[in-house]
Amino acid sequence: MKKLLVITFVSLILLSGCNTEDEYIYWTEKTDNQIQRLDGANIKYEIKGGEIWVREKDMSKVVACCS
């Protein structure tokens, strides 16, 4: 019984660590200047409906290079 609990616990930890999907958050309206800055800083982004969305984990880099 104890072995089953340990295996279940370890499996849950491993599966929760495998989430590789990036969270994107709204940054600003799309302009050529902003796109050039993001590209120059090698920051991944997506364009959705004329808006720039950046990865949440890159937000500090975005603020540093593009503000």
Image: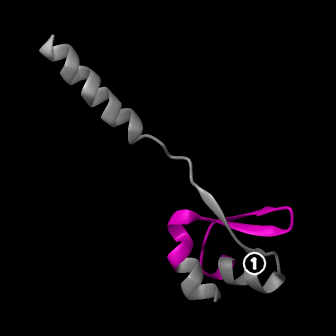
- Residue at the spot 15% in from the left edge and 16% down from the top edge: 3
The image shows a total of numbered marks equal to 1
Which residues fall within the magenta stretch? 39-60
* Vertical comparison of 25 with 6: above or below: below
The amino acid sitting under disc 1 is Ile
Residue 26 x/y as whole percent: 69, 67
Residue 36 x/y as whole percent: 74, 82
Quarter of the figure that contains the C terminus: bottom right
- Residue at the spot 64% in from the left edge and 86% down from the top edge: 66
Residue 34 x/y as whole percent: 74, 82
Q: Which residue is mark 1?
A: 35
Residue 14 is left or right of residue 2, and the answer is right
Snapshot quadrant of residue 13: top left
Q: Residues within 10 Å of mark 1 (few under 14, many from 20)?
A: some
Residue 25 is left or right of residue 47, and the answer is left
- Residue at the spot 43% in from the left edge and 40% down from the top edge: 18
Residue 29 x/y as whole percent: 80, 76
